[in-house]
Every structure is written in structure tokens, then in C-alpha cells.
């Protein structure tokens, strides 16, 4: 269902009672007056074009653009569609601050992963802009629209799951864009090892890494095998174990703290990986090496 809005007043109170997420799809006629609000907003452009005036910036947009607008940032949206046949149609997801509130002690891997994402958006004090390359944003936003229109039991939970998916996608794309790509890649294996040694806590997946370097995953895997006899993933595992050994010897951190520090939050996996590579459990390794220091 699509509504047509001519002014901002019709969007002033977007949240149903006791619901921290609101989603709307509508057609913009003219422009909204400048406004700011005490909740987060994500805008996705479905069709048409226009300009988003936000803070001191003027941002022309078109189909596939997505914007994250932080709390309290003044913005104004203006439709510039050339003909009535191509109206400006957009979807907006608004959510309250409680959804990104920090947790004192994340209890499990899911909470730890989301806390990193939530912290990124909490600390973002400027707008963010994305262009939908593979239709990922469209998939999520239209899923939210379907959930709202269907009003089936549990649709608020569906909105929440879609929002987590959306924030995770935005977070990974932003981390991806912040990396410094080499001007000329002479040795992809050497560069990959150097990259993993710095980013072992939260590295790109191999497919994302290859996309960033504009090389094929098959080519990189073949180069890894030829050069060092290991895969990208095996090299990441070895570097994480190496960093764990250094922390076991040089700190009094708990095994859980060390596993978290090197980017592994599944303790069973951490123990298995460590023993496979070192032949000892982390505790026995620490006891043996601290005695012989």
C-alpha cells in the first residue's frame, strides 16, 4: 500500500503504541519542510529522483539510493521528478534509540556481534549514503513493506529482523569502503597476509576481500596454495592462534577475553582450533610457557 504525502505534518507521529519501529512507503509530492527528530531514520528511494538537503549538504538522489539520518539532524527532501509518470516513491524505516542501546555485558555471540554494529550507528553523528548495487537494500525494504501490508501475526518481529539485516548490511559496506586499496597490487598473497595481520579480529570474508581487490576468489586461492600451501581461511586461523599465544604469555587475561580479542566468540571452536595448531589447550600452553620464561 502506498500513501501520498504533501507535508511533513503527516509523519510527525510515526510509531504505533509501544512499538519502537515504524515503516512507511509513500509518494512525495513537492517537498517536506525542514525537520529533525529524536529517532533514527533510513530512507530508500524506490523510483524517481530529487534532492535531499541535510545539514549543510545538498545531495541529488535517484532510484536505489539509501540514506541513514542520525538523531537531531535537520533535513528536507524535495521531489524533482520530470514527469507525473515517474513520481518520487520512497520507503522509510524509523526506529527509536532503545534498539541501539548499549548492553552492559553481551551474553552471547549474537549480542556481541550486534553490539559492535549498534555502537557504530550510535557513534555516527553524520548522515550516511549508500547505492544499492545488487538489490540487497531493495530486498530488505520490500520485505518490510510486505510485512506491514500483510499485518500477519508476528509482523512487528519480522520488521525487527529486517532492520537488523539492514543495519548489518550497511555496517559491512561502510567498513568495506573505509579500507585503503593499494594503487598497484603486485603480490595478492603478501598483501592478504599483511591485511589479515592487521584486521584479524573482524576481517572481510574472502569473497568480499577479492571483490575489493578486483580479483577472483579462485585466483587468490590458487596463489595461496602455490605460495604458502594454505588457504585464506587457514592463514586467518593461524594468525589468530599466533596472537592468542602472545596474549597467553604476555597478559593475565582469561581464555574468554583472549578468544574475544582475536575475533573468535565460540569457545568450543577456539579450543579446538588452538589445540589443532599448538597441540596443547590454551591453559596448558600458558602454564608451560610462563614457567619457562
Image: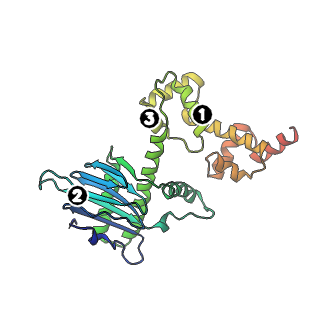
- Of 113 and 287, nearer the camera is 113
Q: Most extreme residue toward the right, as rendered?
A: 291
Q: Residue at x 56, y 63 (%)?
A: 102
Whether residues under marks 2 and 1 lie with C-beta atoms below 8 angstroms apart, the answer is no
Q: Residue at x 17, y 56 (%)?
A: 87
| Closer to viewer: mark 3 or mark 1 | 3
Return the residue at label 3: 212
Can you say whether 255 is above or below 185 in the image? below
- Of 236 and 190, nearer the camera is 190
Residue 167 percent coordinates (x, y):
43, 55
Return the residue at label 1: 235
Can you say whether 124 is above or below 148 in the image? above
Say what secondary structure mark 2 lies in: strand
- Of 97 and 254, nearer the camera is 97
Report, in whole angstroms, how far the alpha carbon at label 3 lies from the one at label 1: 19 Å
| Closer to viewer: mark 2 or mark 3 | 2
Residue 108 percent coordinates (x, y):
60, 59
Q: Earlier in the sequence, mark 3 or mark 1?
A: 3
Report, in whole angstroms, how far the alpha carbon at label 2 lies from the one at label 1: 47 Å
Left or right: residue 257 compared with residue 65: right
The quadrant in which residue 161 appears is bottom left
Q: Residue at x 64, y 45 (%)?
A: 262
Say what secondary structure mark 3 lies in: helix
**The label number, if any, that marks residue 89 in the structure image:** 2
Which quadrant does the N terminus fall into? Answer: bottom left
Can you say whether 287 is above or below 25 in the image? above
Which quadrant does the C terminus fall into? Answer: top right
Q: Earlier in the sequence, mark 2 or mark 3?
A: 2
Amino acid at each position: 500500500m502506498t500513501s501520498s504525502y504533501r507535508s511533513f505534518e503527516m509523519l510527525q507521529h510515526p510509531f504505533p503504541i509501544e512499538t519502537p519501529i515504524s515503516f512507511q512507503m509513500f509518494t512525495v509530492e513537492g517537498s517536506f519542510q525542514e525537520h529533525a527528530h529524536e529517532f533514527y531514520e533510513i530512507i530508500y528511494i524506490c523510483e524517481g529522483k530529487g534532492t535531499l538537503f541535510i545539514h549543510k549538504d545538498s545531495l541529488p538522489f535517484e532510484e536505489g539510493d539509501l540514506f541513514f539520518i542520525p538523531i537531531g539532524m535537520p533535513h528536507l527532501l524535495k521531489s524533482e521528478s520530470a514527469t507525473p509518470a515517474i513520481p518520487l516513491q520512497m520507503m522509510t524505516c524509523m526506529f527509536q534509540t532503545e534498539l541501539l542501546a548499549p548492553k552492559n555485558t553481551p551474553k552471547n555471540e549474537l549480542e556481541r556481534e550486534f553490539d559492535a554494529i549498534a555502537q557504530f550507528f550510535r557513534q555516527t553523528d553524520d548522515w550516511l549514503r549508500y547505492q544499492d548495487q545488487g538489490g540487497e537494500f531493495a530486498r530488505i525494504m520490500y520485505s518490510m513493506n510486505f510485512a506491514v501490508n500483510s499485518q500477519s501475526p508476528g509482523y512487528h518481529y519480522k520488521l525487527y529482523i529486517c532492520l537488523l539485516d539492514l543495519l548489518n548490511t550497511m555496517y559491512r559496506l561502510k567498513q568495506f569502503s573505509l579500507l585503503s586499496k593499494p594503487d598497484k597490487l603486485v603480490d595478492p598473497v603478501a598483501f592478504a597476509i599483511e591485511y589479515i595481520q592487521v584486521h584479524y579480529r573482524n576481517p572481510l570474508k574472502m569473497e568480499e576481500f577479492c571483490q575489493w581487490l578486483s580479483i577472483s576468489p579462485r585466483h587468490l586461492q590458487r596463489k595461496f596454495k602455490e605460495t604458502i600451501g594454505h588457504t585464506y581461511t587457514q592463514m586467518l586461523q593461524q594468525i589468530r592462534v599466533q596472537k592468542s599465544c602472545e596474549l597467553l604469555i604476555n597478559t593475565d587475561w582469561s581464555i574468554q577475553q583472549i578468544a574475544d580479542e582475536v575475533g573468535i566468540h565460540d569457545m568450543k571452536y577456539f579450543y579446538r582450533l588452538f589445540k589443532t595448531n599448538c597441540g596443547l589447550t590454551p591453559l596448558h600452553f600458558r602454564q608451560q610457557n610462563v614457567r619457562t620464561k
